[in-house]
Amino acid sequence: MVIENVLLAFNELSNFTTIMLMIIGVAGGLIAGAIPGFTIAMAVVLTLPFTFGMEPAQGLATMVSVLVGGLSGGLMAGILTGIPGTPSSVATTFDGYPMAQAGKPGLALGIGVWSSFAGGIISATMLMTLAPQLARIGLEFQPWDYFMLVMFALTITASLAGKNLIKGLIAGVAGLLVRSVGEDEAVGMARLDFGSDALLQGFDFIAVLIGLFAFSRLLKDVRDPVDARRTLSDRGAVSVKIEHLGAIKVILKHWTLLIRSALIGVFTGILPGAGGSIANILAYDQAKKTSKNPEKFGTGTPEGIIAPESSNNAVEGGALMTLMALGIPGDVTAAVMLGALLIHDVVPSPTFIMEEPVLAYSIFIAFFAATFMMLGLQSFMLRVFVLVTKIRMYMLAAIILGFCGIGVFAINNIEFDLWTLLWFGILGFIMRRFGFPLAPMILGVVLGNIAELNLARAMAISTDLSLFVTRPWALFFLIVAFFSAFYPIYQNQIGKKKWTLFYSPLACFAASFPLYMMGGIPRPIIATVILFTGAYLLWRRAQSGWALNSATSDGT
Amino acid sequence: MRRLNQDAIIAILLLLVSGVLFWSTFSIRSPDYGVLAPSAWPRAIIIALAFLSSIYLLQSIKDGASAHDEAENPEKEPGLKAWLVYWKNPISCFILFFLYLVTLPYLGSLIGGVAFVFSVMSLLGGFAPRDMVNHAVLSLITVGGMWSIFTFGLDVILPEGVIFSVF
């Protein structure tokens, strides 16, 4: 069955137009990812209008290609100029740039490219094998569980805003509010439309996404008149040849690090809200902690390039896994992918892979193929990148703004979407200015209707509200949401307040409880392991005489 | 104290918006069928927004000036003029995009788009004759290219505009 689906998906994608679109997508993603300030999400969201007229598999393959290209493009700018092209390649610059400065730019790029490739392949393999299994678990979810899953996704995204937890939560709630404008999901009644016909249709969420994310970001980038006229080549980008053979040898020497970092990437991607920007730092940190020569980190060690590059390419496999198996986007980029699926009348859910196997496997195959294309195109695109670095920032910004003005109209062929773009562009700009994170708002906009629909379904089945806290999965998501909401406070107070000693053990005890409730054999075993971990942590802290630094020394 | 005012003002604005929106939920009609009233979900969200805004307000009052982060509040000198100078580029772009939208029914996507991109480039990059020529060529090629892709490649009917429709 799996082989049949893989073959059918291959057949779907094996035509000249699709392959060409994928090559253009990877090339475009590589360049977009390489330009500092132009994030991957921005590249993917701007590709969306081009895919309207395509077949679903073709359009999604193109978007996956841009995504894969973008994930790898960031390393070019990071290594050659010291300025990360995307937030997910920040850690790559820590050792990539010093290595390039030390006269080995070709080797640094080679290590980056091959680590990205390996991370992508590991991630794609896991996506293909684990997504159907995760979808099976997703089939157990009832409306109460789904509603709590959305709340968990929003809470964890907001909590990643760190010290701005309240601002993150406000942004998430504002996103839900934006999505509730117009006809309601369940019975079609007009809401918050203030008598306007345009508002009755609601805000198109792609226009909202482009406004909030791309439009506001571009205008932030051109704020400084001097920076706006600067080119990347002013910062020293030079044309070099990638050293493939030398890089492969180095990577094979550190294969365990490569696999570990890719796994960190995949599991970070599965978590809603946590994307490549977190994974690359996490992987770099882990690589440094486990290295025999941690003092060499920051001076141009290969391990410092392998870890972040393999993890950031692996992230999207994890994010797509949650999206395709549960219908919940793992990060902003996956949220845009959800938008693309919805535009093609495909609603991701646990039954998606079973009901639309060819389309689902087309996405898997596209992820694989795009990773290979990325490897082949890197050397060529490096030359294009050097050319692009000669273009001034304000020119790129103006052209992309112009594209937004045409592309957004193409979504529904109505002018109101362009006004939506402007208002949400202004809103996004103000939010950035006042330190409100945009990711929770974007997830709020994307997940708003899913939350409401499941709430309505749950209430239609039973008016008993206790089901939101007594069903095992709903309770599990509630507990994880609760602890993730308090995580920034815990992180801030760790080593200072006594209660932080009990945070991790308590989280383990609480999370094991709903797992026991689920029954069966594997879940109670996992619950027991989690329970014992909590007990062990508590015992360690008691042994150290409840010393405040025992929580930090455990690393929990 | 400046930051305290900013955060507190935003929190108060959010509370006001929550109030207006909550009031507007009373005009949402409820059908005779369905368990969850159409107003229930927006009301729940607005209550959550008001609750969080209240915490934000209290937090901003409590933290006061200590919450001020220079990096997040980079305008060097106070006053409207300094503020306008500091944010000149983004504000100009927003105004130009607004003008693009207002003139869209008359100029259409092609002429309006070229004019918009050219104006943004010139405003941000300068009005030197050589730059202006570069900007004109770039805007014509890029907007023209995008317009062609959407019109001929993707069969999207973009706004034609009064001027273009004459031809």
Image (tube, rainbow, N blue to C red):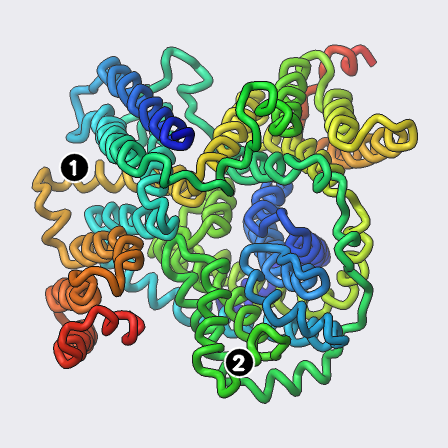
Task: Report the front residue among B78 and A1.
Answer: B78
Q: How many marks?
A: 2
Q: Is residue A298 visible?
A: yes
Could you say which quadrant of the image residue B125 lies in? top right
Left or right: residue B88 compared with residue B63:
right
Query: Residue, x 75% and y 52% (percent of image)?
Result: A232
Residue A267 placed where, x, y %? 40, 67
The residue at 69%/59% (across/down) is A77
Question: What residue is pinned by disc 2?
Answer: A295
Q: Which mark is residue A460?
A: 1
Q: Quadrant of residue A79?
A: bottom right
Residue B167 appears at what percent x and percent y? Answer: 83, 14
| Mark 1 crowdedness (10 Å alpha carbons): few <14, some 14-19, many ≥20 | few
Q: Amino acid at mark 2?
A: Glu
Q: Chain of mark 1?
A: A
- Front residue of A118 and A499: A499
Q: Earlier in the sequence, mark 2 or mark 1?
A: 2
Q: Quadrant of the N terminus of chain A?
A: bottom left
Residue type, mark 1 in image = Ala
Name the chain under label 2: A
| Residue A548 position within the rendered picture, expressed as x and y whole percent measured from the top left | 21, 68
